Amino acid sequence: MEPKQYTSGVLFKRFSPYFKKYKGTLILDLFCAALTTICELVLPLIMRYITNEGLRDLAALSVKTIGGLGLLYFGLRIVDCVASYYMANMGHVMGAAIETDMRRDAYNHLQKLSNTYYNNTKVGQIMGRITNDLFDVTEFAHHCPEEFFIAGIKTVISFVILAGINLPLTILLFLCVPLMLIVCMPLNFKMRGVFRKQRNQIGELNARIEDSLLGHKVVKAFTNEEIENEKFETDNATFYRIKKQTYRYMAAFHTSIKVFDGFMYLIVLVAGGLFMLKGLIEPGDLVAYMMYVSTLIATIRRIIEFAEQFQRGMTGIERFLQIIDADIEIFDEPDAVELKEPKGDIVFEDVSFEYPDDHNRVFTGLNLQIHAGEKVAIVGPSGGGKTTLCNLIPRFYDVSQGRITLDGEDVKHFTLKSLRGNIGIVQQDVYLFSGTIFENIVYGRPGADREEVIEAAKRAGAHEFIMGLKDGYDTYVGERGVKLSGGQKQRISIARVFLKNPPIIILDEATSALDNESEFAVAQSLAELSKGRTTLTIAHRLSSIRNSDRILVLTEEGIVEEGNHDQLLQKKGMYYQFYKMADALK
């Protein structure tokens, strides 16, 4: 799906509220900008006065007058330096603060987005949007109001002063400005387009690098380094082509500015010289005129050249809004209440579900009741919806039709935080955060003390191997826990759930990827974890669910068989076939 695009007006409207918090800093910054502008515009007036007085009557110019003017200009330069320091310092700090606020808002919004968003968006693209893209917003937030404010003051004051010196020459000069805009603005918009492409390709490049580096073991195992290099080279070459296009437009843009610069100087030189010959303008006025024209041209050039930074900032804001405007599909209902001390009765009432993005229907009209404290196992062929069924209980997805109740109340009537806070999940693909073992276990209940963490690890059967490590609970696990074995990671994840101590447990193929020794150790931990809790177990290894109170066989047709282990074997149906196949593979 193509990312949403915004007009400049919409981008300004959505971005401007971020200035509200820093209104005082912005006003003072613009006041300093006005001071620096006034200081710059006074010099041509001083030169005009000295030149005209010198040509009229050189003797009338006294040392006192020149000294006074010099002292005035020196004072103005001090004011200019102080104001410039504030602008360069606090102006940029304000921009950085706005960037920080925007990154915080983007990150907070990302936490609220559903699995569907992450299933369809590359992590590299997301990373680019909340890091690199917002770097340019710092400069944009500072310079955008400042540059346009300065340009407005200089243009208006310059026009008033120049018109007072010679109106026909001023009108002739200012006629060049709209012509410059007509030529330069289309190039400016083209630059916006290529900056958008450039940012998107940076995201693709980041995603490619991340994918390859995280999968480096697979790459090496299949000796596919050359293939990965070729993929990277393709994306890198695409980025290079976009950069070339960017610089082509930038070159045309800056060349157009130089052409109009030269044309405006030419008008002043020729027309101003002719007016002076005819006595329509005094020499001192022409000197002042040329200085003001230089200031005006420098201002116009600065604004137009700022367009490059401006478009980078606008692109960054646009890509930020594409995150902020991503729909929050799973949210608290207005009347949602806290879920407190649930018993664990779970009922699926005529539940149908299809994925929101591709509308792939998983099951239709599913009915199921799980009693409090019951241990229910779910088996079936891949693609039958086992994991999806379990994902609906904590509302990782919402049902398409029907409803799921917990203790008689629709799960949508509970706040997401309290609902998920009462459900513990142990998955096959364990995710450990980069940090220590202690930090990963305490993630189950932030704020728990060390004794509580150790007790949870003991109950999960993890304490012994943790103490055998060099740094014990302070052992660094590496990115995604790469320094630990599969069984060790799994037991740490179980310890995390023990610490959380939820009344409802979901075990999603928690032992299917383990060797026999690790499976036995983890199975003991899971048995301990399940005591007294409503437990749903998804399993491929049927040996791990023989003692379940009830086993469900789930296929694309729904629940086709139900009963305990012995009852299902006696039926000699699908579960019986699964069991025989598993037995034959031993």
Image (spheres, rainbow, N blue to C red):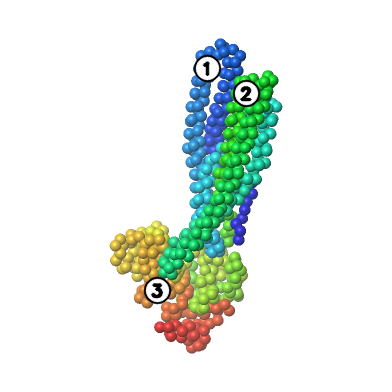
Q: Which mark is residue 514?
A: 3
Q: Kindly identify the amino acid type of the residue bearing the numbered disc 1.
A: Ile
Label 3: few (<14), some (14–19) or many (≥20) C-alpha neighbours in 10 Å:
some
Question: Can you say which quadrant of the picture contains the N terminus?
Answer: bottom right
Q: Secondary structure at mark 1?
A: helix
Disc 1/disc 2 C-alpha distance (Å): 20 Å
Q: Secondary structure at mark 2?
A: helix
Residue drawn where x is 52% and y is 58% of the image? 235
Q: Kindly identify the amino acid type of the residue bearing the numbered disc 2.
A: Leu
In the picture, measured across the screen, residue 492 lies left or right of residue 570, that is left
Q: First in sequence, mark 3 or 2: give its number.
A: 2
Q: Between residue 341 and residue 291, name the one nearer to us.
A: 291
Q: Is residue 82 above or below residue 372?
A: above
Disc 1/disc 3 C-alpha distance (Å): 90 Å
Q: Between residue 425 and residue 121, name the one nearer to us.
A: 121
Q: Is residue 79 above or below residue 193?
A: above
Q: Position of residue 531 (x, y in %)?
A: 41, 73
